[in-house]
Image (cartoon, helix red, strand yellow):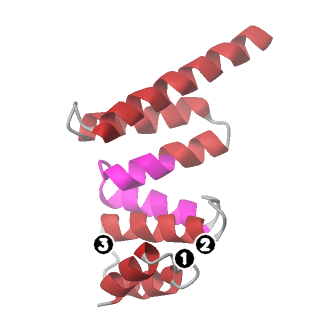
């Protein structure tokens, strides 16, 4: 019930209310990687997109439970990009790409993210 309420809050744009409902759902189902990834996304949404702190902890816990969870991998890739850790973001998005259907829009986006991070790494190397 808490998971359904949390998802409803999130979908309705009540991003300030969603994290509290997700916290209760995660307390009841601590081994659910997808739920933890959704919780991280809700926390970030309530914090203007910041994946630091508790959001990052939930992402890492989700990946410890299920290393191939697509939502957790996508969030981890974004968090690494936000930290300017482009090599780590590439690793997460490569793992995501493998976990998805090759012709899916999400896999195509992962490939574009990988190419963007590789270009950033290349530009950094030229500056040094």
Mark 2 vs mark 3, CA separation in Å: 23 Å
Please say if the residues under marks 2 and 3 sit with CB atoms less than 8 Å apart: no
Which disc, if any, is residue 38? none
Residue interval drawn in magenta: 54-76
The residue positioned 31% from the left and 53% from the top of the image is 69
Image quadrant in which you'd find residue 55: bottom right
Give x and y (percent) for residue 5.
36, 87
Mark 2 vs mark 1, CA separation in Å: 5 Å
Residue 128 sits above or below residue 61 on the image: above
Give x and y (percent) for residue 110.
40, 34
Image quadrant in which you'd find residue 10: bottom left
Image quadrant in which you'd find residue 82: top right
Is disc 3 placed on a helix, strand or loop? loop
Q: Residues within 10 Å of mark 3 (few under 14, many from 20)?
A: some
| Residue corresponding to mark 2 | 46
Q: Quadrant of the N terminus?
A: bottom left
Please say if the residues under marks 2 and 1 sit with CB atoms less than 8 Å apart: yes
Horizontal placement of 41 versus 62: left or right? right
Q: In the image as oriented, which residue stretches furthest toward the right?
A: 128
| Residue corresponding to mark 1 | 15
Q: In the image as oriented, which residue stretches furthest toward the front?
A: 12
The residue positioned 33% from the left and 41% from the top of the image is 106
Is disc 2 placed on a helix, strand or loop? helix
Q: Does the segment drawn in magenta span residue 118? A: no
Q: Residues within 10 Å of mark 2 (few under 14, many from 20)?
A: some
N-term-proximal mark, 2 vs 3: 3
Mark toward the viewer: 1 or 3: 1
Give x and y (percent) for residue 23.
46, 83
The residue positioned 25% from the left and 37% from the top of the image is 104
């Amino acid at each position: 019930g808490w998971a359904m309420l949390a998802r409803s809050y999130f979908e309705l744009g009540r991003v300030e209310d969603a994290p509290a409902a997700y916290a209760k759902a995660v307390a009841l189902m601590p081994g659910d990687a997808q739920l933890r990834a959704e919780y991280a996304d809700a926390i970030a949404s309530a914090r203007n997109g910041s994946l630091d702190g508790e959001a990052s902890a939930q992402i890492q816990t989700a990946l410890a439970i299920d290393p191939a969870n697509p939502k957790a991998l996508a969030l981890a890739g974004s968090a690494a990009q936000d930290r300017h850790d482009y090599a780590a973001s590439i690793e997460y998005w490569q793992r995501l790409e493998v976990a998805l259907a090759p012709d899916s829009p999400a896999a195509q986006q992962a490939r574009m993210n990988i190419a963007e991070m590789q270009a950033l790494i290349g530009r950094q190397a030229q500056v040094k």
